[in-house]
Amino acid sequence: MTEYSLSIDNLFVFVIIMARFAVPKPIQQAVLMMGIIIALVLRGVFILLGARLIEDFSWIFYLFGAWLIWTAIQQVREDHDDEEQQDSFVVRLLRRRVRVTDTYDGIRLRTHVDGHRHFTPMLVVLIAIGTTDLLFALDSIPAIFGITESAFIVFTANVFALMGLRQLYFLLGGLLEKLVYLKYGIALILAFIGVKLVLHALHENELPFLNGGHGVAWAPEIGTWTSLAVIVVAIGGATLASVLRMRHQPVER
């Protein structure tokens, strides 16, 4: 549930990228699948690294928690439409260094133009999706580690969530921009899990300058069922509020 909820945010970016690079509808599903495979490989590396850090440095939960809380604040302050105006540094660098055609050639990465080999916009789209998802992994992977420290469960949760994006993209693609309160639900989830991680870090504290290197007794442990309830209420409430707003908005003529 955590990964599915946070993956909804990825959909906003996927929709923006597909529209920005004018990906033809017949190849959108193939593009999405290739992007998901790239994301799985990158996230697998992140998960292994995160599991190792947690095993060796329990205080890493303080950093994870603080990062999620800061990300939640940014989630509320920023507008997804702003992301449409910006390309990642990698994409901008690629456009300057590599010859890229203006048109697609199916799902091919390279094609011939006037006897010369050029890359197609497909390469730029895949890199944009992969690098963007890597940024989202900085949020979702620490969040899922706040519920379980098993690297296997973290990875399989990411697999199911990312594969579910394929169906959600085509099911909700046109509806996402109307769910105006969804970002607040996602922000609430990130903030909640961030606080949960900080409390867990306090409970298992090993920092010598904090409480003499001992756990803080008053720091409560938040259970998995509580986390699940918060996620369901946050996403359900944000979706319901968005739907009610749509129903009460005047119809544009």
Image (cartoon, rainbow, N blue to C red):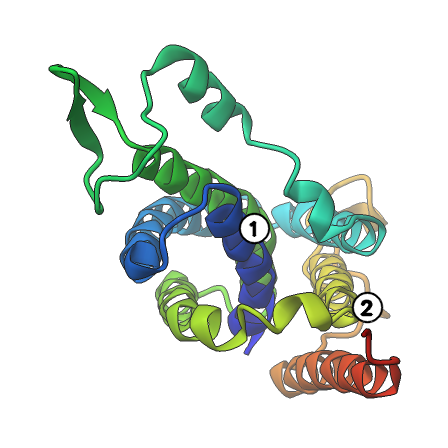
Residue reaching furthest to the front: 253
Residue 101 percent location from the top left of the image:
32, 26
Measured Cα–Cα span from mark 1 to mark 2: 41 Å
For the point 73% across and 59% down, the residue is 194
- Residue 53 in sight here: no
Answer few, some or many: residues within 10 Å of disc 1's Cα (few below 14, many 20 plus, some between 14 and 19).
some
At label 1, the amino acid type is Ile
Q: Position of residue 80 (x, y in %)?
A: 70, 51
Image height check: is 225 above or below 154? Answer: below
Which amino acid, by three-letter code, is at mark 2? Answer: Ala
Q: Which mark is residue 16?
A: 1
* Marks 1 & 2, CB-CB < 8 Å contact: no
Q: Position of residue 229 (x, y in %)?
A: 69, 87
The earlier-in-sequence mark between 1 and 2 is 1
Q: Which mark is residue 219?
A: 2
Mark 1 vs mark 2, foreground winner is 1
